[in-house]
Amino acid sequence: MNSAKAIFKKQFKASVKHPETLIQFMIYPVMALVMNVMTNIDFGDYDLPQEMIDAMIANMPNLALMMATMFAGMALIPAVAGIIAEDIERKSLRFLIMAGVKPSAYLIGVGSVIFLVSIATTVAFGFIAEFGGVDFLIFVAALLSGVAASIVLGAIIGILTKNQQAATALSMPIAMVLGFGPMMAQFNDTAARVLNPLYTQQLNVIADALNGALDTPIWQSFAIIWSNVAIIAVLFLIVFKKKGMGD
């Protein structure tokens, strides 16, 4: 626990000195807010077909919620991967090995900083989506579960790479599939079936269920999300051990 606290303090200080990585997390809720505002715009003054106007207004709230899924899938994975790759590049990870830091302590220390910032972003998404009461808590719990999965997945990618450039190159394609995939699933049933086992797709399922668009047990989606977290966590421990934290 002391190791995790020390790593947390180190990462927190680094994030304060270089806040640009964390500031980008706020881009997603801002875009979601803009989409919600656009649903109140009077498109009657624009020379657009009524069918197009109706479709835009109907889909804008869904697109706003998709921004939450994109945040969980796209913003966090490259951020965490970059942080860990930087530790490897600077040889500080090797020093932590010699100090006897355990994989779990390292992951908790680094991931806690990203998780805390993500709480604020997640709460913002909940208010933007206008969830209330129990639905708000369910939405926050679901999105933070996705955040946890992405943090661990980003950690795996970071450990597999030798520098930040390589971490970005490897993490971005994965992040794009997880972030944009659920959006494709909204318009393609085949894509929805293929992506169904992924935690980001289940975030969309939960959001749709809370909005009454789907009649599906929410607990099933939580079970799939946390199965993702468990599998990714096991893979992290395996990769951590084989790579020797920076060998």
Image (spheres, rainbow, N blue to C red):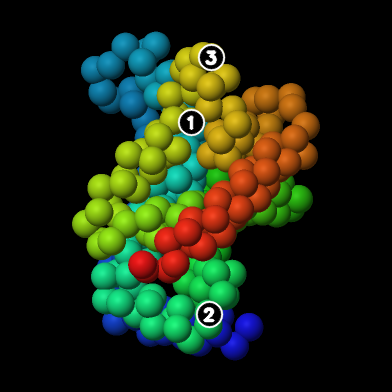
Local secondary structure at mark 1: helix
| For the residues bearing labels 1 and 3, Cβ distance under 8 angstroms | no
Dot 1 amino acid type: Pro
Asked whether 93 or 191 is in front, the reply is 93
Residue pointed to by mark 2: 101
Q: In terms of sequence position, does the residue under pointer 3 or pointer 2 come before the other?
A: 2
The disc placed on residue 189 is 3
* Residue kind at label 2, given as amino acid type: Val
* Secondary structure category for the residue under label 2: loop
Give the x, y percent position of residue 72.
Answer: 48, 49
Identified at 37% across, 30% down, the residue is 42
Q: Which quadrant would residue 220 be assigned to in this image? A: top right
Where residue 191 sits: x, y (%)? 49, 19
The image's mark for residue 246 is: none
Q: Which residue is located at x 61 percent, y 53 percent?
A: 234
Q: Secondary structure at mark 3?
A: helix
Q: Is residue 41 above or below residue 189?
A: below
Picture residue at 51% right of the left edge, 73% below the top: 106
Q: Is residue 236 left or right of residue 19?
A: right
The residue closer to the viewer here, 81 or 239, is: 239
Say which label, 1 or 3, has the lower sequence index. Answer: 1
